[in-house]
Image: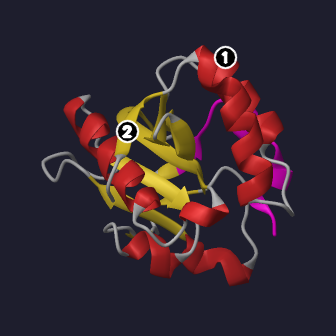
């Protein structure tokens, strides 16, 4: 991954972020949730991967909680986007790794994701059974709901994942 630099995004990066998501996900409109997250969710981690000052990847980690355990420090990894011409170059994996390192340093004990098990499994995510997603998932998505424990000394939380308002739209949790 030569010449890739990962850093926290800034407000000036927003035009590049707005251009990245339609290119990475031509069949999905993730810009409304990305904009709401970046504009109004305190404590989130928004990382960009830059190559020669051009944004080639972006990820957001949103602070969450468990409805049955308000003390649990949890996070949701979503969305993750990599420019089509930069895919299959480990940029997404590098963004995930950097985000996980920052979350662990910040005391987050567990991270959740709804995504391809083959892809996220390479970063250590496994099917999640003790915390339910904010909305019911279709049966075919069951293995896509995954988590990764960052602090093995903390007892895993249970219940339902409580997410900030931008993630409460049921449409975001359906195929």
Vertical relation: 21 (above or below) 175: above
Q: Residues within 10 Å of mark 2 (few under 14, many from 20)?
A: some
Q: Quadrant of the C terminus?
A: bottom right
User: What percent of the width, then of the height, locates residue 1?
Assistant: 33, 59
Return the residue at label 1: 40
Residue ID at (66%, 28%): 37
Between 119 and 91, which is closer to the camera in this rendering?
Answer: 91
Pinpoint residue 110: horizontal percent, then vertical percent.
34, 48
Count numbered badges in the picture: 2
What is the x, y in percent for residue 75? Answer: 45, 41
Identified at 49% across, 73% down, the residue is 88
Q: Secondary structure at mark 1?
A: helix
- Residue 119: horizontal and vertical position, in percent? 47, 75
User: Mark 2 vs mark 1: which is more N-terminal?
Assistant: 2
Residue at numbered disc 2: 6
Q: CA distance from mark 2 to mark 1?
A: 22 Å
Q: Which residues are magenta?
A: 160-175
- How is this picture coloured? secondary structure
- Front residue of 69/52: it is 52
Which residue is depicted at the point 73% across and 48% down?
21
Q: Residue furthest left?
A: 153
- Residue drawn at the location 82% of the way across and 51% of the way down: 170
Q: Is residue 83 left or right of residue 148?
A: right
Instruction: Specify whether residue 164 is painted magenta.
Output: yes
Q: Is disc 1 surrounded by few (<14), some (14 to 19) or many (20+) residues within 10 Å?
A: few
Q: State if disc 1 and disc 2 touch (CB < 8 Å).
A: no
């Amino acid at each position: 991954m030569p010449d890739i630099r990962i850093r926290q995004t800034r407000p000036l990066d927003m035009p590049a972020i707005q251009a990245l998501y339609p290119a990475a996900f031509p069949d999905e409109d993730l810009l409304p949730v990305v904009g709401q997250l970046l504009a109004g969710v305190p404590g989130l981690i928004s990382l960009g991967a830059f190559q020669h000052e051009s944004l080639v990847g972006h990820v957001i980690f949103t602070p969450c909680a468990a409805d049955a355990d308000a003390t649990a420090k949890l996070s949701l990894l979503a969305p993750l986007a990599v420019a089509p011409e930069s895919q299959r170059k480990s940029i997404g994996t590098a963004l995930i790794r950097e985000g996980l390192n920052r979350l662990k340093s910040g005391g987050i004990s567990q991270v959740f994701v709804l995504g391809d098990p083959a892809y996220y499994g390479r970063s250590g995510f496994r099917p999640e059974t003790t915390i339910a997603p904010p909305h019911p998932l279709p049966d075919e998505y069951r293995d896509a709901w995954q988590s990764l424990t960052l602090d093995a000394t903390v007892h895993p939380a249970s219940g339902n994942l409580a997410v900030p308002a931008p993630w409460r739209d049921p449409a975001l949790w359906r195929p």
